[in-house]
Amino acid sequence: MDILQQAGASALGSRFRRLAERLSLQAAEVYKHYELQVEPAWFPVLYALNQHGAASITELAGMTGQSHPFISKSVKQLQAAGLLKSVPSKADKRVNTLTLSEQGKALMPVLDRQVNDIGQALSVWLNDVSPDFLKALEKLENGLNNTSLIDLVTQRGRLPEGYRVVPFRQGDENAFYTLNKIWIERHFEMEDSDRAALLDPENYIVNKGGHILLMLAPDGSVCGTVALISMPKHTFELAKMSVSDAHQGRGLGFELGLAAISLARRLKAKRLFLESNRKLTPAIHLYEKLGFTEVTDSTPSPYSRCDIQMQLDLH
């Protein structure tokens, strides 16, 4: 029994790791066959420099899609083996770039032949396994570049049956205004900043780079709202979160928060920020459950009711 196969998709990372270990061990044998004195882990750096010329560690990480620490480790090993050298950048003499040494360049004809031979052999084998394997792998890699596992898990849906989160649409203005007005006036008084956002959400929020998400009930009516208001430095303010009284107690506020966080990550935001009031104990607990922590060096707020600011670092 293969326990990882039995675990299905939940063990995908472990199965890829296991596959990488097997391929790496077998690749080492192939290198020996071609009399190449290199480690399989060095291949991405060698191949990138051979194809594109001098590059920095950051550029190599970008080209290969591997982490900065992993590339740094490979570079140190390659330099110790005499296969790389560091040279000043042509664009900026203060910056060093990496290039193949004479010893490294001497290996390239053999490496090219090996890459070609392995590529042809694996292409035939993969075609028998699954003709679209490489395309599927590329889609998987691109997909994970645009989202993350935590996003996939939280988007999976703990929503009660029939509920769904959708983007703000023209025609939803009245529901957005009404739900938030009811919530604000239950606890505080409407302020000028509230009216500006609620009376014209498209111009005040959406057209300024922000986003609004709505929770739809099973009958299609809007029963919850949340907004991401664009701020400087890759930051969004989480605001205007409300759930109608008739749909309370179903965890919809938490799901709206998760959806907003997921959207912020897809937008490459670095931080989420929010303002609240300490007397709203359930709301504060909700924000803490979502991962927000209190900001100690708070900035002036446009809302008189605000006495706590919180943030969530996304990257």
Image (spheres, grey):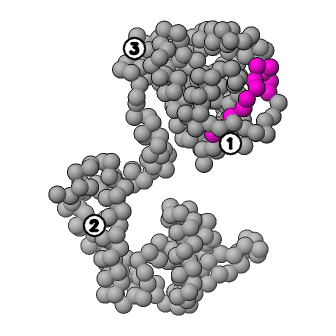
Residue at mark 1 to residue at mark 2: CA–CA distance: 42 Å
Give the percent coordinates (x, y) of residue 10. Answer: 33, 48
Q: Are marks 3 and 2 in contact (CB under 8 Å)?
A: no
Mark 1, secondary structure of its residue: loop
Q: Amino acid at mark 2?
A: Ser
Residue 291 lies left or right of residue 310; in this view the side is left
Q: Sequence order check: which comes first, mark 1 or mark 3?
A: 3
Q: Is residue 216 magenta?
A: no
Query: Alpha-carbon neighbours of circle 3 within 10 Å: few (<14), some, or many (≥20)?
Result: few
Residue segment shown in magenta? 301-312
Residue 299 lies left or right of residue 258; in this view the side is right
Q: Sequence order check: which comes first, mark 3 or mark 2?
A: 2
* x 63%, y 39%: residue: 312
Give the percent coordinates (x, y) of residue 166. Answer: 49, 24
Q: Amino acid at mark 3?
A: Pro
Mark 2, secondary structure of its residue: helix
Q: Are marks 1 and 2 in contact (CB under 8 Å)?
A: no
Q: In front of the other: label 1 or label 2?
A: 1
The residue labelled by disc 3 is: 218
* x 56%, y 20%: residue: 225
Instruction: Please name whichever residue, 7 or 44, is drawn nearer the observer in this view of the structure.
Output: 7
The residue labelled by disc 2 is: 123
Give the percent coordinates (x, y) of residue 300. Answer: 82, 30
Instruction: Please name whichever residue, 83 or 195, is drawn nearer the observer in this view of the structure.
Output: 195
* Placement of 133 over or under 268, stated as above or below: below
Q: Is residue 304 magenta?
A: yes
